[in-house]
Image (spheres, grey):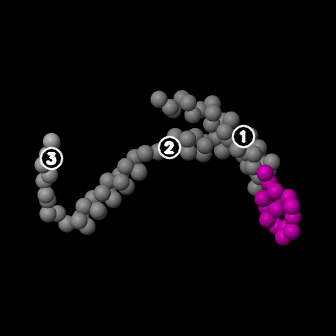
């Protein structure tokens, strides 16, 4: 049988929680998802801007009507396809 020795400390539990929260915040600030940054850059390309404008126009048109069966699914898929096509060419250069 193996016995473990544990050291008992009498610290303030609230202080420990604050320290843990501060460490978590520091870790979150340091980590940046490359996918999100690349997506943001790709959304600014000419083709993506054009498809995003078509999507926003459709959403405005559908939102202005109270009784319509129209959906902007095609425009959404066109925008996502254009953005993901751009991302696919750039993302794997950032992956180790």
Mark 3 surroundings: few (<14), some (14-19) or many (≥20) residues within 10 A: few
Q: Distance between the residues labelled 3 and 2?
A: 40 Å
Comes first in the chain, label 3 or label 2? 3
Which structural element holds mark 3? loop
Which structural element holds mark 1? helix
Q: Which mark is residue 81?
A: 1
Q: Mark 2 points at which residue?
A: 33
* Residue 29 place in picture, x, y as percent: 41, 50
Among the 4 quarters of the image, the one containing residue 83: top right
**Does residue 67 show up magenta in the picture?**
yes
Among the 4 quarters of the image, the one containing residue 88: top right
In the picture provided, is 29 more to the left or to the right than 14? right
Kindly report which numbered mark, 3 or 1, lies closer to the viewer in this rendering.
3
* Residue 52 place in picture, x, y as percent: 73, 49
* Residue 24 place in picture, x, y as percent: 36, 54
The number of discs equals: 3
Mark 2 surroundings: few (<14), some (14-19) or many (≥20) residues within 10 A: few
Mark 1 surroundings: few (<14), some (14-19) or many (≥20) residues within 10 A: some
Please give the range of residues in magenta: 58-73
Furthest toward the front, the residue is 1
Which residue is at a point 29% across and 62% down the rendered structure image? 17
Q: Distance between the residues labelled 3 and 1?
A: 56 Å
Q: Which mark is residue 4?
A: 3
Marks 3/1 in contact by CB < 8 Å: the verdict is no
In the picture provided, is 90 more to the left or to the right than 27? right
* Residue 8 place in picture, x, y as percent: 13, 57
**Does residue 20 show up magenta in the picture?**
no
Instruction: Choose between 14 and 38: the one closer to the eye.
Output: 14
Marks 2/1 in contact by CB < 8 Å: the verdict is no
Please tell me whether residue 19 is drawn above or below residue 83 in the rendered image. below
């Amino acid at each position: 049988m193996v016995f473990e020795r544990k050291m008992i400390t009498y610290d303030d539990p609230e202080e420990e929680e604050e320290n843990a929260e501060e460490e978590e915040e520091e870790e979150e600030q340091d980590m940046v998802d490359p996918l999100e940054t690349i997506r943001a850059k790709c959304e600014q390309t000419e083709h993506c801007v054009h498809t995003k404008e078509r999507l926003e126009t459709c959403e405005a048109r559908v939102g202005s009507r109270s009784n319509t069966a129209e959906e902007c699914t095609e425009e959404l898929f066109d925008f996502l396809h254009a953005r993901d096509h751009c991302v696919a060419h750039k993302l794997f250069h950032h992956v180790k």
